[in-house]
Structures are given as C-alpha cells and as structure tokens.
Image (tube, coloured by chain):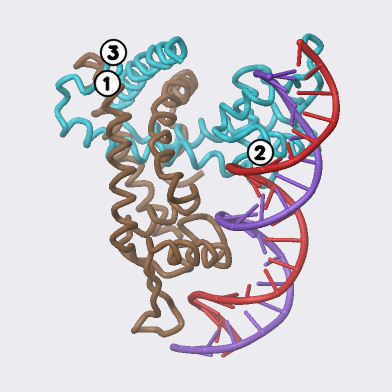
Chain colours: A cyan, B brown, C red, D purple
Amino acid sequence: MPIGRGPANLPADLVIAVAAAARPLVMVWGRADGISQAQVSPPQLRALVAVGQHGSLNLSQLADELGVIPSSASRLCDRLVAAGLLDRRVSEQTRREVVLTLRREGQRLLDTVEHARRDALADVLGGMRLGGRKALLSGLEAFAEVAGQMAEQDQWTA
Amino acid sequence: MPIGRGPANLPADLVIAVAAAARPLVMVWGRADGISQAQVSPPQLRALVAVGQHGSLNLSQLADELGVIPSSASRLCDRLVAAGLLDRRVSEQTRREVVLTLRREGQRLLDTVEHARRDALADVLGGMRLGGRKALLSGLEAFAEVAGQMAEQDQWTA
DNA sequence: TATTGTTATACTCTATAACTATA
DNA sequence: TATAGTTATAGAGTATAACAATA
C-alpha cells in the first residue's frame, strides 16, 4: 500500500455510492467526444488532447500518455499529420527526437469538443438546484485537489 | 432548444469550473477499465457493460448502445462469443433476432472492473476531508437525478 | 416488402519484431 | 552500446455494400 494513502477507514457504502452516482457525469462528459468523430477517430482525439495539454511532446512521451507503444503512436501521428491537425518536426536539440505540436486546425477541433462538453454539462446543471450545483463544484474541486497531489507524488516515486 | 431545458441563466463561469474540476474524476474513473485490457479490448468491454446493464439485448440494440452499426457489433460479438464471455442464441419469439447475454466469465470480468474502479476512487476519497466527500456525493447524486430525468424525457421524445 | 442479421472488402488502431539514425 | 523513431506484418474494430432469412 502506497505511503500516506489507502482506504483510510472509508465506509464501503460511501465508495459504492460515489461510484454509482458518478456514472451519469462520466457518461455526459464522454458524450461530447462524439462530435469529433466525423473528423478523427477516438484514439486520434486522445492524441490531440495529450499534445494540447502538454504544449509539445516527443513520440515516446505521447505513447506513454496514450498507454500504447511508440510504434503505434508513430502510425497515429502519420494520420494526424496527413490530416493537417498535428505538426511533427525533428528536435533541434537532439536530432533523434521529434517534437509534436498542434496545428491551428487541431487546436480548433479541441476547442469544438470542449465547447460541446460545456454545453452538455450546462444542459444538466441548468436543471439542478443552486445547492446541488454548489455541492457538485466544491466536491469535484476537493477530489481534483487530492487526485492532483497523488499524481505529483507518483511522478516523484516513478 | 428542448422544452424545459437550456442554459437557464447559468453563469458561464460555473460551467467552465465544473468542466475543469470534473476532469480528474473522469480520468480516475476511466483508469479502472485498463485492468481488463489483458482479456478484452476497450470496445469489447463496452459491449459487455452494455449487455450487463440491460440483462439481455438483441444485436441492433447493442449496436445502438455502442454507437456503431449492426455489422460492427456482429463482428464484436463473434470475438466475445469465441472468448467465452458472451452468449448469442436465436430468439424463441422472433427467429430473426438474436439474444445476447453475459456468460459467467463475462460477468466476472465486469465485477473485476467495478472492483478496480471502487479501489481507484477510494484511493482519492481516502485523502479527502469529510466535508468534501459529503459535498461530492450529494452533488453527484443531484447531477445524476437530473441527468436521469432528461434521459427518460429523451426516450419519450425519440 | 420491411426488418434482422451476417459476410466481403477496405481502412484504422494496435503490438511484435526488425530496422535506421543519433548520442 | 543505448536510445528515439520508423517500417513490415498481422490481428482487431469499424463502415459501406451486398446478401440471406424471417415477419
């Protein structure tokens, strides 16, 4: 068990309840990705998101982010470059690495997806009471803070 | 705009904040799916989840649930049946339909994924304060209730 | 004739293995 | 020699189109 973690006397009921209650939010979140499928496949969208979040990545980093091997990531980039969504050029520092960045069209696609995601969330939030919205936001922020701390810790550990 | 919905005077800031705060929860949720990848591909897992949630489905219903065409769903089922996770038999009522149900191994795989999901959530929940956990649960439940109502409404509309 | 499902074909995603180029 | 990336090959996922079987 990782240091400073573990099921710290958590009632099992709470975990089960959160897992059940979170499903609709996850489904609404994921639905927005669908509007990009006319232009790119789901793996291609994930690649664009990964590059967008980091600003730029090399091929191995992208493969790690996607949980695939570099070979697969390379082929994925072939198609994104061909589609004009991604830029792949040789690094000027170390000429055996490549630098992946979003092209304008790629960023535009991510913006479209993010906009659709907000619309989908707003659709539900609009039907909630003020108290529910406040609880949701503060609860998600508390979750995000702890999750972020753990991600940092993992980075140091690994 | 659908009747009784729409961005009902929602501050744009709130929507943006929720969209940003929800991302870590969605990521933690999705991470659990990874443990199934030794046995099945992501699309295969989605198919098992869909069948598991409905108890049984015919091929067209499964295709609808997955957002693919029946042809693709048919091929997907070929492999799940071959893997011993899914049962496909001709309906006794209408002999041109098939009835898809989980086999014991398929249900066991879903249970494993659900368990991993709860572990991943518990890992973060354990690092949160009591107030944060309460807010998260009540907020998610409020979201889920509204999302559920909208899903019902859509079913009648469609 | 309309509905349900399967099969043939082609393209994408992926891993394994073998390769080239750089450090 | 080790690292970064690409290419060849093969199996899985998908859509389009054509088909068979049932209602």
| A93 shown above or below A120 | above
Local crowd size for mark 2, using a 10 Å CA cut-off: few (<14), some (14–19), many (≥20): some
**Residue lying at 78% horizontally and 9% vertically, measured from the top left:** A93
Give the class, few, some or many, for how many residues have Cα within 10 Å of label 1's Cα (few <14, many ≥20).
Answer: few
- Compared across the picture, whether B64 is left or right of B91 comes to right
Q: Specify the subunit that label 3 lies on.
A: A
Q: Earlier in the sequence, mark 1 or mark 2?
A: 1
Amino acid residing under circle 3: Ile
Occupied quadrant, residue A13:
top left
Above or below B46: residue A153:
above
Give the camera-side residue of C10 and B154: C10
Q: Tell me the tag on residue A3.
A: 3
Crowding near the residue tagged with mark 3, few <14, some 14–19, many ≥20 C-alpha atoms within 10 Å: few
Q: Position of residue B122 (x, y in %)?
A: 26, 27
Check disc 3 and report its element: helix, strand or loop.
loop
**Which mark identifies residue A72?**
2
Q: Is residue B114 left or right of residue C13?
A: left
Distance (Cα) linking label 1 and label 2: 33 Å
Q: Is residue A122 left or right of residue B92?
A: right
Q: Residue at x 55, y 58 (%)?
A: B68
What percent of the width, then of the height, locates residue B103? 32, 63
Name which residue type carries label 2: Ser
The reply to whether the C-beta atoms of the residues labelled 1 and 3 are less than 8 Å apart is yes
Q: Report which residue position mark 1 lands on.
A: A1
- The percent coordinates of residue B108 (x first, y second) are 29, 52
* Quarter in which the N terminus of chain A is drawn: top left
- What amino acid is at disc 1? Met
What label does residue A142 carry, if any?
none
